Image (cartoon, helix red, strand yellow):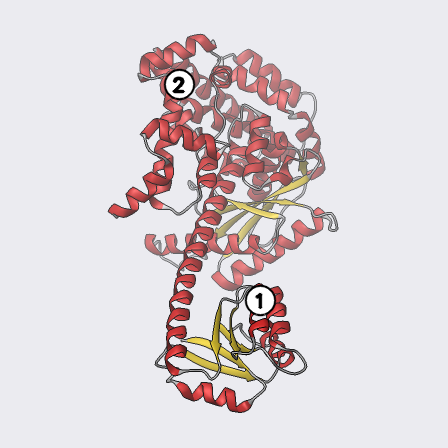
């Protein structure tokens, strides 16, 4: 049922219009009446906007032209129908200039009124369908953007990234430009849900539903603060992470503490669950995100359902500074080359044996090294390996170690295992290293990828890598990346209403025009034609 407001200074005219037809049968309901423009504006400001406004032109106080101009400024989507007499030609010209398309001549005839209402009904229905489609498209874009933001944040804290410039460009594309600022202080917060003993009796289906509810609540809580960004590791469904940055007018530490209290309260109140929360050290710059994340995980490992343990943060701060991007690069090279002597020398520089670091601080270093090991193991391993699982299990229980010797012994054993895994891939047949590179490309084709960057990451000569890739994959590196991007584009064109600019960004192409050109060259048809043809078959 569509709504109408009638505006005319003569009550007789209003009553006559109301009596002309069965409005309900026509799909309309007259919600209100007004006797002049000023009265009509007051009505409009105090209620839900009607679908149609029928107004006379000649009225006291504010005439129809004044009302139309005000409505076009305040309510541009409102449909306006003008009532006019044969002698109101000049007024009608003014109404048309103001944007009015529909009119009724006085006295209003039943046939003309019915025809106009049928026309308006069809237009409103079409507009509502378009609005629903636009809402659906916006929702799809928002969901895609949120998923990509979460993937990006997880990547920044767990994966090796070859180009700081490429990461910054991607952050800009994903509306995370605040983190491009190298001086912006941020903190990571880790939240794990804990199910009270005996509540579910290990029913798998119920725990999965609780995981889903927990993740939704965390995202909704973050959504109410524009400086909080949630992200999630699918391997650990009971845990959510948050990246928090300060607004200019608020202190970052105070806000992070306030958010921790909020999320703890909501999990207890709405889900009836306990939770363990860790708050990391404040860090600045993308290269320090892994340090901030590691300190958050360490804080989590030392906390309980009764409170967050942040003891030892001052000691950790010095170690965060020591664990620089250059130090991390050297550690990666030593491990991937299987050079245990170089690795041990670097570890001695980070935590010299003659300095008696508190266990909390020393455990931070172990947590940070484990994160580095995990990144290397994933880089050279095939899928989720037993080694990767062992590394993560160690990461999750690092807070249980009670001595420096225990931690060093564990790190030494794991370092040798990761070195063995990397060397096995690098020193075996060319097919093994290409397989690792191909897997990396499959996971990262949406980012800027070049042979030069990949050759540097996998310690190979660029020309040698180019030939090796063509030999084992059957196509050139460039052809392979293009194929991945075009196949993903087809999927998005077929199963979403996303704009071409959005799809181009999602598949790693910065220009929509270049995307269209590449797509047509690859498939022989434009993206628009492909979508239309797919929809016609659906």
- Name the residue tied to disc 2: 477
Q: Is residue 68 visible?
A: yes
Indicate the position of residue 188 as horizontal and vertical percent values.
60, 42
Q: Is residue 136 left or right of residue 296?
A: left
Q: CA distance from mark 1 to mark 2?
A: 54 Å
Residue under the point 73% across and 51% down:
250
Q: Residues within 10 Å of mark 1 (few under 14, many from 20)?
A: some
Residue drawn at the location 34% of the way across and 39% of the way down: 529
Count residues near mark 2 (Cα–Cα under 10 Å), then give few for <14, some for 14-19, many for 20+: many
- The residue most toward the left is 537
Percent position of residue 78, x then y: 53, 68
In the picture shown, does residue 431 fall above or below 305?
Answer: above
Residue 391 appears in view = no
Task: Work out whether residue 178 or residue 288 is closer to the camera in this orientation and state it.
Answer: 178
Q: Which residue is mark 1?
A: 75
Check the image and report above or below for 498 versus 483: below
Residue 69, image x, y percentages: 62, 68
- Helix, strand or loop at label 1? It is loop
Front residue of 172/378: it is 172
Q: Residue 365 falls in which quadrant of the image?
A: top right
């Amino acid at each position: 049922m569509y709504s109408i407001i009638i505006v005319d200074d003569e009550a007789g005219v209003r009553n006559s219009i109301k009596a002309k037809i069965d409005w309900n049968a026509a799909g309309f309901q007259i919600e209100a009446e007004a006797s002049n423009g000023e009265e009509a504006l007051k009505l409009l400001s105090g209620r839900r906007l009607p679908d149609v406004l029928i107004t006379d032109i000649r009225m006291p106080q504010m005439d129809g032209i004044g009302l139309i101009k005000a409505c076009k400024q305040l309510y541009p989507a409102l449909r306006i129908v003008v009532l006019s007499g044969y002698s109101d030609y000049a007024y009608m010209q003014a109404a048309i200039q103001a944007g009015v398309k529909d009119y009724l001549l006085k006295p209003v005839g039943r046939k003309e009124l019915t025809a106009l209402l049928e026309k308006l009904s069809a237009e409103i229905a079409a507009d509502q369908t378009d609005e629903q489609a636009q809402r659906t498209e916006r929702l799809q874009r928002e969901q895609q953007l949120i998923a990509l933001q979460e993937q990006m944040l997880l990547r920044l804290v767990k994966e090796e990234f070859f180009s700081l410039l490429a990461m910054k460009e991607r952050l800009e594309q994903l509306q995370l430009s605040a983190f491009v600022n190298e001086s912006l202080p941020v903190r990571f917060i880790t939240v794990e849900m804990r199910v009270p003993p005996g509540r579910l009796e290990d029913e798998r289906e119920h725990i999965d539903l609780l995981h889903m509810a927990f993740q939704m609540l965390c995202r909704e809580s973050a959504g109410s603060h524009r400086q909080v960004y949630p992200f999630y590791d699918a391997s650990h469904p009971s845990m959510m992470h948050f990246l928090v940055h300060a607004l200019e007018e608020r202190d970052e530490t105070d806000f992070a503490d306030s958010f921790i209290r909020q999320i703890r309260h909501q999990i207890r109140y709405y889900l009836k669950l306990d939770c363990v929360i860790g708050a990391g050290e404040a860090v600045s710059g993308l290269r320090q995100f892994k340090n901030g994340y590691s300190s958050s995980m360490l804080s989590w490992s030392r906390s309980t359902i009764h409170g967050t343990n942040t003891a030892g943060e001052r000691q950790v701060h010095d170690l965060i500074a020591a664990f620089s991007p250059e130090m991390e690069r050297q550690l990666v090279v030593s491990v991937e080359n299987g050079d245990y002597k170089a690795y041990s020398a670097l570890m001695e520089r980070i935590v010299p044996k003659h300095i008696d670091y508190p266990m909390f601080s020393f455990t931070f270093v172990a947590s940070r090294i484990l994160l580095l090991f995990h990144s290397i193991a994933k880089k050279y391993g095939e899928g989720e390996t037993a080694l990767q699982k062992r590394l993560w299990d160690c990461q999750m229980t690092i807070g249980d170690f009670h001595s420096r010797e225990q931690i060093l012994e564990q790190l030494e054993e794991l370092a040798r295992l990761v070195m063995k895994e990397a060397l096995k891939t690098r020193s075996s047949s060319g097919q093994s290293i290409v397989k690792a590179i191909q897997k990396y490309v499959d996971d990262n084709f949406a980012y800027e990828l070049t042979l030069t960057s990949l050759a540097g990451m996998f310690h190979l000569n660029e020309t040698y890598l180019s030939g090796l890739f063509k030999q084992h994959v059957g196509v050139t590196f460039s052809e392979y990346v293009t194929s991945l991007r075009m196949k993903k584009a087809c999927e998005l064109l077929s199963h979403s209403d996303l704009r071409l600019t959005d799809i181009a960004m999602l598949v790693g192409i910065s220009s929509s025009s270049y995307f269209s050109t590449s797509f047509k060259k690859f498939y022989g048809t434009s993206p628009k034609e492909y979508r239309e043809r797919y929809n016609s078959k659906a």
